[in-house]
């Protein structure tokens, strides 16, 4: 994994062309790993109870708070590879 950022970018691009759409839990995991790898720890206030999607995304991202960017990239790449069947 010497060129992890390139593998991550390739995984992000290929995640749009998966054979079938992952379930919601997997989509939230992909979102959280992507945000952690690209932006770091979650910041700001948790969305209100009327914003169910925003709240779910925030919670998924907050659940992996403290994960290093490189580790999040590696997990994202592994998850996309698993979804593609590699």
Image (cartoon, helix red, strand yellow):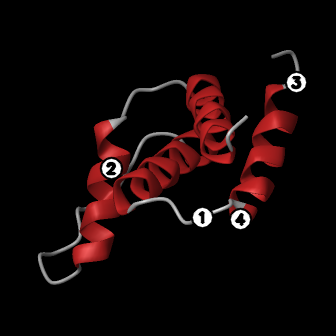
Most extreme residue toward the top is 2
Q: CA distance from mark 2 to mark 3?
A: 27 Å
Earlier in the chain: of badge 2 and badge 3, it is: 3
Q: Which residue bears the numbered disc 4?
A: 16
Query: For residue 17, what is the image quadrant?
Result: bottom right
Closer to us: mark 1 or mark 4?
1
- The correct choice, above or below, for 24 with respect to 77 in the image is below
Q: Which residue bears the numbered disc 3?
A: 3
Earlier in the chain: of badge 3 and badge 1, it is: 3
Tell me if label 3 and label 4 are in contact, CB under 8 Å: no
Closer to us: mark 4 or mark 2?
4
Query: Where residue 71 appears, x then y in whole percent?
Result: 58, 23
For mark 1, give the secondary structure: loop
Query: Where residue 13 appears, x then y in whole percent?
Result: 79, 57
Q: CA distance from mark 3 to mark 4?
A: 21 Å
Tell me if label 2 and label 3 are in contact, CB under 8 Å: no
Residue at the spot x=68%, y=59% of the render?
Answer: 18
Earlier in the chain: of badge 4 and badge 2, it is: 4
For mark 2, give the secondary structure: helix
Q: Which residue bears the numbered disc 2?
A: 60
Q: CA distance from mark 4 to mark 2?
A: 20 Å
Closer to us: mark 3 or mark 4?
4
Tell me if label 4 and label 2 are in contact, CB under 8 Å: no
Q: CA distance from mark 1 to mark 4?
A: 10 Å
Q: CA distance from mark 3 to mark 1?
A: 27 Å
Earlier in the chain: of badge 3 and badge 4, it is: 3
Tell me if label 1 and label 4 are in contact, CB under 8 Å: no
Q: Which residue bears the numbered disc 1?
A: 20
For the residue pair 40 and 29, the one nearer the viewer reads as 29
Give the total number of marks visible in the rendering: 4
């Amino acid at each position: 994994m010497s060129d992890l950022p390139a593998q991550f970018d390739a995984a992000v691009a290929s995640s749009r062309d998966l054979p079938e759409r992952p379930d919601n839990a997997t989509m939230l995991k992909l979102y959280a790993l992507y945000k952690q790898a690209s932006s770091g720890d979650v910041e700001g206030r948790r969305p209100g109870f009327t914003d169910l999607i925003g709240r779910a995304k925030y919670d998924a991202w907050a659940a992996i708070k403290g994960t290093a960017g490189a580790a999040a990239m590696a997990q994202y790449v592994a998850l996309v590879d698993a979804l593609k069947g590699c």
